[in-house]
Image (spheres, rainbow, N blue to C red):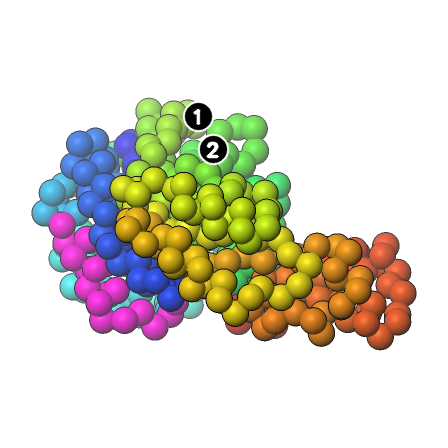
Amino acid sequence: MKIVHTSDWHVGCRLYDNDRSADHRHMASKIIEICRDRRPDALLIAGDLFDNDRPSAADERLVADTLARLHAEVPEMTVIAIAGNHDSPSRHESHEAVYAAAGVVMIGRITDRDPDWPGRYIIDVGAGVVVAVPFYIAKGTDLARLMAEADKIADGRPVVAMGHTTLRGSDTTGHDPRIIGSLEAVEASEFLPPSSYDYLALGHIHRSQRVGAMGRIRYSGSPLAVSFDEAYPHSVTWVEIERRGDIPATGKIEIDQPRPLVTLPSPGRWVALDEALECLREFPDDTEAFVRLNVKTDRALPASANDDARRAAVGKRCRVCHINVRRQAEAVSESGASGMSVDELRMVAPADVARLYAQSVGVALDEELFDEILTQLTTVNPDDETA
């Protein structure tokens, strides 16, 4: 059984109001090329096909055109796309019959109250079966029974499951909290019975990685960087499984980034505005990129800062998206949060805003208790509407 595993396309996402449709078209063309060359039995898109639950007509057309081209190039391949926490489950399924004619299975939500339960969620791709488990799972749905039924249908062929969730122990480095949302992390055994699948294709975490020691669970990661802090390669995952019970053979196929997201002077390094502007002036003229400047300061940025950055990039093919400001510690103690601009305040972590406020009103925080509260809020944030 041969699979291309991908997720988290986030079609429609913008980068500080910069349109990225050209980047998504490039990404789509690369995935089509991989499928055409490798001829997999299935392409699995494990959630967050779109960046929001109300994509524009242009974004829907980009996805529809991509899926149609995939079918035209590899007609024997089944495409299976599940809804993630950024997708609309009803929109995923609204054109189900049309997509089915092009070899595409769209699953928006899962419930054992479905009259077609459980067969609707078990897709036979010839060399094996795929069990589609979207983010939207009706309470009480018996996933163990679903997997048992899949094993019967597989009749000795490989069983692959796909889902959209956060597993404990996964690496969320670089994630923008507004993008990843606040899905509660679960143990792999809480999600699906470990012995019920040969491979678990996951979406939601943007960094490609293996979870656990057995090699049966992977996040493919996003094929396109969504935020500047995702400073790592982006890829899709190639999977081969000989027979039921075998450990999958997997490999990453890197997707080149047509306009990479570049932080100057470098991720994690902060310099004065003048030095950051000099780094921008030295940036290669012919390199296409989105650029963020990391600037540290003990006062508000001058009103001309953005114009200065744009002037420094004149004649270059890069585009300056944002000046990322970090207040120096000694300045914070003198001025507190009240001396920060709105843009600066938006870039400060919520925990630091709380500390600044406590300092400004003369309250001493119990740091041990505060850290425990932050841990709980990081795990579950009921107010985050993207969850």
Residue 98 horizontal side relative to residue 184, left or right: left
Residue depicted at x 69% and y 59%: 298
Q: Amino acid at mark 2?
A: Arg
Q: Give the secondary structure at mark 2.
A: loop
Please check the rendered image and state whether residue 54 is part of the magenta-colored stretch, yes or no.
yes
Residue 247 in sight: yes
User: Mark 2 Cα within 10 Å, few/some/many (few <14, many 20+)?
Assistant: many
- The residue lying at 36 percent from left, 45 percent from top is 260
Tell me which corner region of the image, top left, top right, bottom left or bottom right, holds residue 329: bottom right
Q: In this view, which residue lies farthest toward the left?
A: 72
Q: Nearer the viewer, residue 92 or 66?
A: 66
- For the N terminus, the quadrant is top left
State whether residue 156 is above or below residue 181: above
Q: Measured from the top left, where is residue 300 in percent x and y?
A: 62, 66
For badge 1, the amino acid type reads Ile
**Residue at (36, 52) in percent of width and height:** 313
| Real-space Cα separation, disc 1 to disc 2, in angstroms | 7 Å
Say which element carries label 1: loop
Q: Which residue is mark 1?
A: 247
Relative side of 8 to 356, left or right:
left
Q: Is residue 152 visible?
A: no
Q: Which residues are magenta?
A: 52-69
**Residue 340: percent from the left, percent from the top?**
66, 69
User: How many numbered circles does the render carry?
Assistant: 2
Quadrant of residue 334 in the image?
A: bottom right
Mark 1 vs 2: CB contact within 8 A: yes
Residue that mark 2 sits on: 216
- Could you say where residue 274 lies in the image, as x and y percent from the top left? 53, 51
* Residue 87, above or below 175: below
